[in-house]
């Protein structure tokens, strides 16, 4: 058999061009932005914090969410309670990416989470993965002593005496 030279240069060119577009393909989410919004008694935002969280299998589990809540419910030595949990997911398709840069469409959807369970993220365009967010809204715990719910009312159980007594003859 004759040794035929195979020109593989076109394969290398194709792979190089394909590599340039890799950031526009959908992939599993491995990083999310975690945002904390702190609200005071006057319902005004007084502090915002955020950090990046690395996740596995496009999912943040229940235990990690509870751990985050416990670690960040205190802000400036003030205890807060969780008022809301929101999830912002980027769900734009690669075909619509050009419209995104022309400001014609919104790239994601904001979801309110009612029950805390494992939170899954759909595959996202690699370039936009860092925009997937988990938003915790904390409000200052009410410690007012005049609040009926903040104090315990004492109840005593005694028998009442009858107002009139019977006379027997």
Image (cartoon, helix red, strand yellow):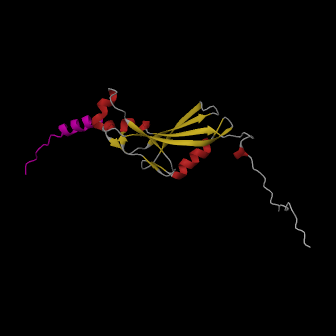
Residue 154 percent across, percent down from the top left: 78, 53
Which residue is pictured at 41% across the width and 44% down the height? Answer: 29
Which residue is pictured at 63% across the width and 31% down the height? Answer: 42
* Quadrant in which the C terminus appears: bottom right
Residue 95, picture quadrant: top left
Q: Is residue 3 magenta?
A: yes
Which residue is pictured at 43% across the width and 44% down the height? Answer: 30
Residue 50 percent across, percent down from the top left: 54, 35
Q: Eyeballing the image, is 163 above or below 60?
A: below
Residue at the bottom extreme of this rendering: 169
Q: Quick check: 8 left or right of 76?
A: left
Residue 71, picture quadrant: top right
Q: Quick check: 9 left or right of 59?
A: left
Depth check, front residue: 54 or 111: 111
The answer to whether any part of residue 20 appears in the image is: no
The answer to whether any part of residue 165 appears in the image is: yes
Residue 89 percent across, percent down from the top left: 41, 40
Which secondary structure dominates the residues rendered in magenta? helix
Residue at the right extreme of this rendering: 169
Residue interval drawn in magenta: 1-20
Residue 19, picture quadrant: top left
Q: Quick check: 80 left or right of 108?
A: right
Q: Is residue 36 magenta?
A: no
Count of numbered labels shown in the rendering = 0
Residue 148 percent across, percent down from the top left: 71, 44
Depth check, front residue: 109 or 90: 109
Depth check, front residue: 89 or 12: 89
Residue at the top extreme of this rendering: 102
Residue at the left extreme of this rendering: 1
């Amino acid at each position: 058999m004759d040794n035929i030279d195979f020109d593989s240069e076109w394969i290398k060119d194709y792979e190089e061009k394909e590599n340039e577009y890799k950031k526009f393909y959908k992939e599993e989410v491995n990083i999310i932005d975690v945002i904390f919004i702190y609200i005071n008694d006057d319902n005004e935002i007084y502090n915002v914090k955020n950090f990046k969280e690395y996740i596995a299998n496009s999912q943040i589990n229940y235990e990690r969410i509870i751990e985050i809540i416990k670690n960040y419910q205190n802000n400036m030595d003030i205890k807060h309670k969780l008022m809301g949990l929101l999830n912002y997911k980027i769900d734009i398709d690669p075909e619509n990416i050009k419209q995104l840069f022309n400001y014609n469409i919104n790239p994601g959807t904001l979801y309110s989470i009612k029950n805390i369970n494992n939170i899954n993220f759909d595959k996202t365009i690699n370039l936009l993965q860092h925009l997937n967010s988990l938003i915790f809204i904390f409000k200052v715990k009410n410690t007012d002593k005049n609040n009926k719910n903040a104090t315990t009312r004492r109840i005593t159980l005694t028998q009442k005496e009858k107002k009139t007594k019977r006379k027997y003859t």
